[in-house]
Amino acid sequence: MSCDQCREREAVIHLTQIVNEQVTTLHLCERCAAEKGVESPGGVTKTPLGSFLAAMGKGPEQAPVARGSGACSRCGASFQDFRESGRLGCPECYQSFEAPLRDLLRRLHGSTHHMGERYVARGQPIPEQRPQAAELREQLRLAVETENFELAAELRDRLRVAE
Amino acid sequence: MIDLSLLTDGGVGWLDASGPSSHLVLSTRIRLARNLADRVFQGRNSETEREDILAVVERAARDTVLLRRATKFRLDQLDRTDRQLLHERHLVSKELAGLDPDGRVRSGATLLVQDQIGVMLNEEDHLRIQGLHSGFALEAAYGEADRLDAELGQRLAFAFHPEFGYLTSCPTNVGTGLRASVLIHLPGLVLTKEISKVLQGLAQVGLTFRGLYGEGSEVVGNFFQLSNQTTLGSSEHELLDHLGKMVRQVMDYEEQARQVLLRDAPAIIEDKVWRAYGLLRYARALSFDEAMNLLSGVRLGVGVGLIPDVGMYTLNKLLVHTQPAHLAVAEGVTPAEPDLPIRRARFVRKVLESEVGRRG
């Protein structure tokens, strides 16, 4: 079987994922799996982030490390510091290293979008929530039309939270 | 010596076996990671900044309903036995207690706790709000943690990003900052050797497991902490629903495994649980691991109705009080005391004897 990603090398890793109760299986070769942050069972990881961080440092498609000087403008931490410690320096680091972090978050959580409670600090205006709700409502309408009821149920729950 | 009597329930309300499904689930824990917007993260904080964070958060906490009467434990001013005691009660993480082999307790490391709710300060994040409930009670435990989060969030400015959510020092916690864990006893699945399949299945649906003491701890006495792996991309209630559904399924599997054992190997199981009881009742020396494994056997026996004379509460009490720091403090020795296994066996015998005596 050839790799689903590069369609060249032999697939050696078979990754089954269940997302929203949909089962998908990916067949990957060693290299593509590493690029996706998937370790073969024999792989050794020291920290929970080890394999992800190692995978990010490999291959020609490596995301550019931060913009500008490569250090966070607020706390002075570099992306290399994060790679070594697995800890960011300050809240601003999320902006300073946005591109590689976005990539990492997608691999870790399968998403970059916070869907939970919105925080409003005291004295700040409550942010406009409607666009998100409207978008969900549209997705819900489509899901119902296409009779994808599992998705519809999930969207309805999300909509309830959004509203 | 810290005075745990300051805590209304001695900090072990979560072990009273009164919660839902408490024959299988010991406790439910909720943790919310939060950071102050105007500060760098803990790893880059100086000693002065940590003191400052402690002062600012404590002031806010004393102004809330949920932590107004909180008891304060400064881990950095406690000796190792006391820190270990709080860790054994599941009130502080290993990291905050500075119990890692090379670990030192960090300056400013503090716990504020009132009844079932608390907040760890200067942990990996500035605040770790935590709620601990008896039995399987995800919504109740989350509800309380959420209320404290709202109370504190009105008095402090938390680091929040419109897209990424609550910002945490480690990106594995970003978004909701929520880790929900259920401490569950699964001897049936271990004995039928189904456990690895179940744990692999959980990994595929985005859940993870840990040992009795959470992150980085070993599985002892067939206790597993099941929790959500991801914190971003789903709402708090979706994460809780998903974990809850899966835990219920694991509970069903465990019940089925117990039925299979009773059906296919009744004599072996009966011998196993009574043998565990006999050893606890009469042994003259017990290591902690051995005590935990035997307690697991007796708990299974009580759960399937083979051992009628022992209450879940007694088993929970033994679970807590046979831990090294607890036993050492009760006996007035240090956890390194060489005859601790002898003292442990004596303690267990006494508790079980009085239980049987009480029930006639």
Image (cartoon, coloured by chain):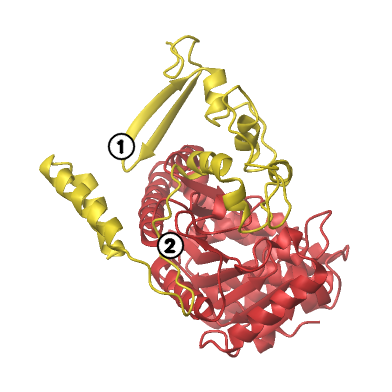
SS category of the residue bearing label 1: strand
Q: Which residue is mark 1?
A: A22
Q: Which residue is mark 2?
A: B305
Chain hosting mark 2: B
SS category of the residue bearing label 2: loop
Percent across and percent down for residue A6 are 46, 15
Percent across and percent down for residue B3 are 74, 85
Name which quarter of the figure residue B273 lies in.
bottom right
Where, quadrant-wise, is the C terminus of chain A in this rendering?
A: bottom left
Residue at point 36%, 40% (across, down): A19
Discs 1 and 2 share one subunit: no
| Few, some or many residues within 10 Å of mark 1 (<14, 14–19, 20+) | few
Question: In the figure, what tint was chain B given?
Answer: red
Taking depth in this image into account, of B314 and B26 the one nearest to the observer is B26
The kind of residue on which mark 1 rests is Gln
The kind of residue on which mark 2 rests is Gly
Percent across and percent down for residue B228 are 48, 52
Chain identifier of the yellow chain = A
Taking depth in this image into account, of B78 and B172 the one nearest to the observer is B172
- Mark 1 to mark 2 CA distance (whole Å): 40 Å
| Few, some or many residues within 10 Å of mark 2 (<14, 14–19, 20+) | few
Kindly give the residue lying farthest to the left in the view shown.
Answer: A145
Taking depth in this image into account, of A43 and A116 the one nearest to the observer is A116
